[in-house]
Image: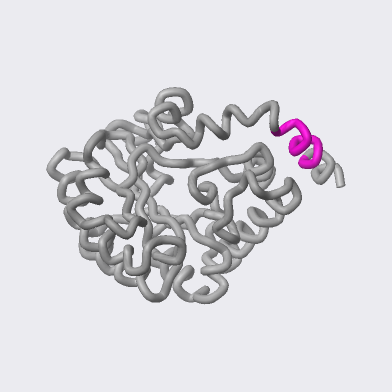
Amino acid sequence: MRYARKLLVAGGVAAAVQVAPAVAAVGPVRRRVLPGLAGRGRAGHVALTFDDGPDPASTPAFLAELDRHRVSATFFLLGRMLTDCPELGRELADAGHEVAVHGWEHRPMPLRGPLATYDDLARARDLVAATTGQVPRWYRPPYGVLSTAALIAARHLGMTPVLWTNWGRDWTRAATARSVLATLTRDLRGGATVLLHDSDCTSAPGSWRTTLVALPGLLEELRRRDLAAGPLRDHFRTTSSTTS
């Protein structure tokens, strides 16, 4: 009950503290003002992240492509998607990928009350942990828009919100593999967190195929720039922990 009251109080004063969520939703401002939230990590690394799965129609193709390149990534899972294919969630973890929380339903956080927000995050976190054996460390809100209640709930549940520095706009109907790659790499540098989608459950139908075609080009470009690609768990390591 104490936590419920805290959420209700936070919801009541949300209008006074919505500046941070608003800033978080604006890419250039977010990268400058809130680099940790934006996903800015160590200089020689790029975090590769995928949202909206797991999806049996598309996620296995991404797993195969990542395996072919021997690269691991962080997958931000939706609880409602994981309930339909728990074995795919386990496969993600067994393949060495990191699993994280994208919520239960893909609905904007500011449209929810504090208790509904907490329930959404808690249900998704508990299901991801029980299904994959990994306790999620990271949370990314739908559409990248945080609310005060979501920030409080994530902290209470032991998860750190992480958005992104670069995206491919791969969810749009007009996206092509060339446009996705060009958009991703326009301002790409070491320390970036890249957002892509391994499912079209909230995107243009079939858009995941465009992302899949663009993925090898992205990985090749990172290798050309001598940047390591991997999950968020490797992204925020300190320099002292990565040198011999």
Residue range of the region highlighted in magenta in the rendering = 7-14
State which quarter of the image contains the C terminus. top left
| Residue 12 sits inside the magenta stretch | yes
Which residue in the rendered view is the most extreme toward the front?
174
Residue 215 in view in this figure:
no
In-image side of 226 versus 71 (left or right): left
Q: Quadrant of residue 176?
A: bottom left
Question: Residue 126 appears at what percent x and percent y?
Answer: 64, 60
Residue at 75% across / 38% down in the picture?
11
In-image side of 89 versus 63 (left or right): right
Question: Residue 207 appears at what percent x and percent y?
Answer: 32, 63
Is the image coloured rainbow, by chain, by secondary structure, or in one colour? one colour
In-image side of 24 versus 193 (left or right): right
Question: Residue 166 appears at what percent x and percent y?
Answer: 33, 40
Residue at 66% across / 37% down in the picture?
148
Is residue 239 placed above or below 152 in the rendered structure?
above
Residue 84 in view in this figure:
yes
Is residue 115 placed above or below 239 in the rendered structure?
below
Which residue in the rendered view is the most extreme toward the right?
1
Residue at 66% across / 28% down in the picture?
17
Question: Residue 231 appears at what percent x and percent y?
Answer: 38, 49
Which residue in the rendered view is the most extreme toward the left?
224
Is residue 213 placed above or below 145 in the rendered structure?
below
